[in-house]
């Protein structure tokens, strides 16, 4: 389905989690990082190719489509299937803090990256952007029947996150486990 890419474009496999669905597909983009794909989208929608989507926690009812438009405001968080190494020349020095993000029905633990030499309260106050990158992430949803999974990076919809707080324990659930064991 993916044909006729423009100069500098490449396909990126994405998984988008909404309130009720897991959407998997491929986006052709010039962006290199997941956070750039999500934060610098020219429209409030992404059009994916070779799409499958199903209700999470049910394991049935998978739908397939050659293309699908997904509303970014409905996306809770996004996961890229491939890891992109950061380009040193574009890096802003930041300090990684372990965090818990609650974005119902999901919980996510991982590392958020904040400006250095600031009080944590002030750094959280200055955390902006439609999608917040979280590295070394673990995400799960007991209520939706989604076992814990890990990803090198997820991009969390900042407007949909209900709580973003420091997290003192790196002992979140192991991949494939629920947090309660």
Image (cartoon, rainbow, N blue to C red):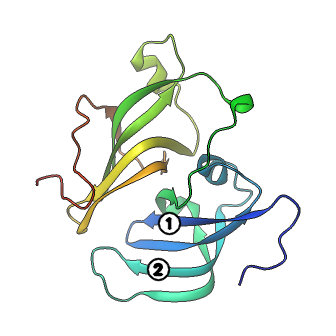
Residue 99 shows in the view: yes
Residue 155, percent from left and from top = 51, 49
Badge 2 element = strand
Name the residue beneath numbered marker 2: 53
Mark 1: few/some/many CA within 10 Å (<14, 14-19, 20+): many
Which image quadrant: the C terminus?
A: bottom left
Q: Is residue 77 left or right of residue 20?
A: right
Residue 132, percent from left and from top = 51, 42
- Closer to the chain start, of discs 2 and 1, is 1
Residue 168, percent from left and from top = 24, 28
Circle on res. 154: none
Circles 2, 1 touching at the beta carbon (< 8 Å) = no
- Structural distance between the alpha carbons of marks 2 and 1: 9 Å
Residue furthest toward the right? 7
Q: Considering depth in this image, is 46 or 168 the residue closer to the camera?
A: 168
Q: Residue at x 53, y 25 (%)?
A: 126
Name the residue beneath numbered marker 1: 15
Q: Considering depth in this image, is 33 or 38 the residue closer to the camera?
A: 33
Residue 140, percent from left and from top = 29, 57
Q: Is residue 85 left or right of residue 157?
A: right
Q: Residue at x 56, y 34 (%)?
A: 128
Q: Is residue 39 left or right of residue 170?
A: right
Residue furthest toward the left? 181
């Amino acid at each position: 389905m993916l044909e006729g890419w423009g100069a500098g474009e490449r396909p990126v496999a994405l998984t988008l989690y909404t309130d009720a669905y897991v959407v998997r597909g491929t986006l052709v983009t010039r962006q290199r990082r997941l956070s750039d794909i999500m934060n610098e989208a020219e429209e409030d929608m992404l059009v994916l190719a070779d799409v499958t989507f199903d209700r999470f926690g049910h394991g049935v009812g998978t739908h397939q489509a050659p293309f699908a438009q997904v509303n970014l405001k409905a996306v809770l968080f996004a996961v890229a299937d491939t890891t992109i190494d950061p380009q040193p020349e574009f890096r802003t020095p930041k300090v990684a803090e372990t965090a818990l993000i609650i974005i119902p029905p999901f919980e996510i633990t991982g590392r958020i990256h904040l400006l250095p030499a600031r009080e944590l309260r002030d750094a959280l106050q200055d955390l902006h952007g439609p999608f917040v990158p979280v590295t070394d992430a673990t995400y799960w949803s007991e209520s939706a029947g989604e076992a814990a999974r890990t990803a090198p990076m997820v991009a969390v919809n900042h407007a949909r996150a209900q709580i973003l707080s420091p997290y003192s324990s790196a002992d979140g659930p192991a991949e494939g486990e629920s947090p309660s064991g």
